[in-house]
């Protein structure tokens, strides 16, 4: 094949790839939501309803995503992770394909490195232009409610089994937990967890980054939203 023909082929396929390339950005908050694929199978041998090892694997994956994607914050519950990004300063110039594929692969490698299951976990990843910091607050309300629903369902399922739960409302499922070891579900399992980065002064007066994983309680979520609001005030100031 001639060099000219090869160049033509290359240009053609590059153009076809470019047609499927999309870019995002232009709003304060962009979110990547990454979810374990078929995790009911991956977690089959784990403790029900809450397994500390898979939770810490999800936390480790969240920390890696926060670092690798220079995220504002990360939220995790069950087999899902939401990465909140600064929509004005996105990696890969906001290329959707890159953001989705890189985030899903970081999650899969991090989880398996922690679990050492010798299985093959994978994740899907989706992207949303969330909008303002207020919208990020609403997004967290939505995911935290989903976490509570998941937690109550899993605990009731582990206690009573699927047959008894048939046609039971959320409140009735909650009632099943009364008097059991799940009457008071751990805050991190109930609400999910927030992963956040702080800048702190160390003993010798040098600024250092510190990463913290905390339960996504109402109070911790409100603190995070305040911090992100402050971040954007300073970010605007730096840009002006
Ligand atoms: N045993 C155990 N399983 C867990 C734990 N956390 C998450 N899981 C499993 O992960 C699943 C997550 O739910 P989904 O994401 O809806 O289900 P999925 O099987 O991953 O299905 P797809 O996401 O559609 O591929 C739960 O149904 C559980 O089976 C845990 O702490 N212990
Ligand atoms: Mg899943």
Image (cartoon, helix red, strand yellow):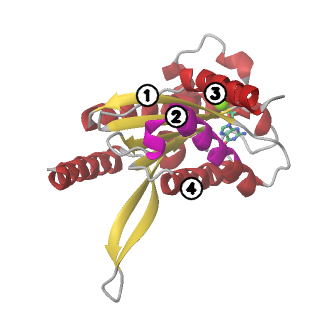
Q: Tags 1 and 2 in contact by the CB under 8 Å rule?
A: yes
Tell which circle, 1 or 4, labels the residue nearer the N-terminal end. Answer: 4
Q: Does the numbered disc 2 mark a residue whose Cβ is under 8 Å from ligand 2?
A: no
Examine the image and state in which quarter residue 199 appears. Answer: bottom left
**Mark 4 near mark 3, Cβ–Cβ under 8 Å?**
no
Secondary structure category for the residue under label 2: strand
Q: Which mark is residue 11?
A: 3
Label 4 neighbourhood size at 10 Å, few (<14), some (14-19), many (20+)?
Answer: some
At label 2, counting other C-alpha atoms closer than 10 Å, the crowd grade (few under 14, some 14-19, many 20 or more) is: many
Q: Residues within 10 Å of mark 1 (few under 14, many from 20)?
A: few
Looking at the rendered structure, the number of numbered marks drawn on it comes to: 4
- Which residue is denoted by mark 1 in the rendering? 128
Quadrant field for ligand 1: top right
Q: Nearer the viewer, residue 31 or 235?
A: 235
Left or right of residue 52: residue 237: left
The location of residue 181, given as percent across then percent down, is 61, 44
100 part of magenta stretch: yes
Q: Nearer the viewer, mark 2 or mark 3?
A: 3
Query: Visible in this render: residue 103?
Result: yes
């Amino acid at each position: 094949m001639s060099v000219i023909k090869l160049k033509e082929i290359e240009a053609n396929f590059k153009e076809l790839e470019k047609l499927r390339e999309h870019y995002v950005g232009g709003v304060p908050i962009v979110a990547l939501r990454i979810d374990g694929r078929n995790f009911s199978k991956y977690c089959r041998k784990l403790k029900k309803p809450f397994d500390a090892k898979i939770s810490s694997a999800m936390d480790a994956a969240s920390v890696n995503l926060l670092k690798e994607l220079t995220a504002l914050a990360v939220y995790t519950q069950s087999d899902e992770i939401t990465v909140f990004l600064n929509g004005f300063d996105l990696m890969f110039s906001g290329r959707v394909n890159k953001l989705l594929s890189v985030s899903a692969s970081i999650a899969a490698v991090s989880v398996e490195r922690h679990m050492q299951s010798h299985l093959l976990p994978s994740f899907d990843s989706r992207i949303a232009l969330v909008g303002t910091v207020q919208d990020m607050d609403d997004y967290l309300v939505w995911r935290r409610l989903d976490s509570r629903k998941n937690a109550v369902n899993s605990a009731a399922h582990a206690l009573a089994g699927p047959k008894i739960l048939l046609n039971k409302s959320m409140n009735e499922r909650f009632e099943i937990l009364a008097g059991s070891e799940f009457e008071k579900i751990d805050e991190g399992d109930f609400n999910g967890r927030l992963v956040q980065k702080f800048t702190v002064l160390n003993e010798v007066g040098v600024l250092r980054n510190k990463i913290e994983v905390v339960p996504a309680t109402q109070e911790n979520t409100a603190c995070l939203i305040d911090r992100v609001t402050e971040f954007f005030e300073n970010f605007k100031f730096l840009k002006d």
